[in-house]
Amino acid sequence: MAEHAGSDSGASALGRDAVKEVADAPDGAVVVRLAGELDLYNAHDVRDALLTALAAGPQRLVVDLAEVSFIDSTALGVLIEARTRLKNRRAFLLAGPGLETRRALEVSGLDRHFAVHATVDEALAARL
């Protein structure tokens, strides 16, 4: 995977970047790797990374949540916004959410609206 860009300014309360990597994947897919606490303070960095990735017109956008330790309603809203901007909304996939992130998706009801996969590889291989 070729790296597009990372975010230097999206430090969370723990000092980790919210956006670790935006990378090309096979078959016109893009993977956006997120990490740490996703909240009001870095949601703009996540939004910028997702919208930049979407501007390239990917066939599929996979958001890797494996290293996300917390996600608040602002960051969930960013995911919703990004998904609405993709022509084929089924091509917006979430991968690898941990317990806390999965719980936030379930409590908000978003797990019924997003395709959630255990791993990035599963998301990349999923039928759209």
Image (tube, rainbow, N blue to C red):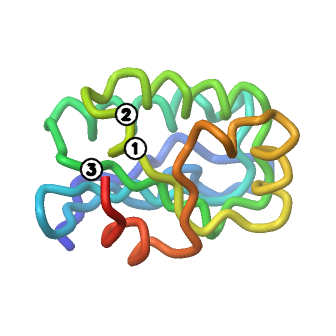
Relative to 106, say whether 116 is above or below.
below
Inter-mark Cα distance, 1 to 2: 6 Å
Q: Nearer the viewer, residue 85 or 8?
A: 85
Inter-mark Cα distance, 3 to 1: 6 Å
Earlier sequence position, callout 3 versus callout 1: 3
Q: Nearer the viewer, residue 105 or 77?
A: 105
Relative to 58, say whether 25 is above or below.
below
Q: Where does the image place residue 30, in percent across and percent down from the top left?
A: 26, 55
Quadrant of the image occupied by residue 116: bottom right
Residue 89 is labelled as 2
Mark 2 lies on a secondary structure that is helix
Q: Where does the image place residue 117, in percent across and percent down from the top left?
A: 54, 66
Horizontally, is 76 left or right of 8 in the view?
Answer: right
Q: Where does the image place residue 43, in percent across and percent down from the top left?
A: 61, 31
> Of the residues shown, which amino acid type is indicated by label 3?
Arg
Check whether the beta carbons of the residues at disc 3 and disc 1 lie within 8 A of each other: yes
Q: Where does the image place residue 10, in percent across and percent down from the top left?
A: 56, 42
Check whether the beta carbons of the residues at disc 1 and disc 2 lie within 8 A of each other: yes
Q: Pointer 2: residues within 10 angstroms few (<14), some, or many (20+)?
A: some
Earlier sequence position, callout 2 versus callout 3: 3
Mark 3 lies on a secondary structure that is strand
Quadrant of the image occupied by residue 105: top right
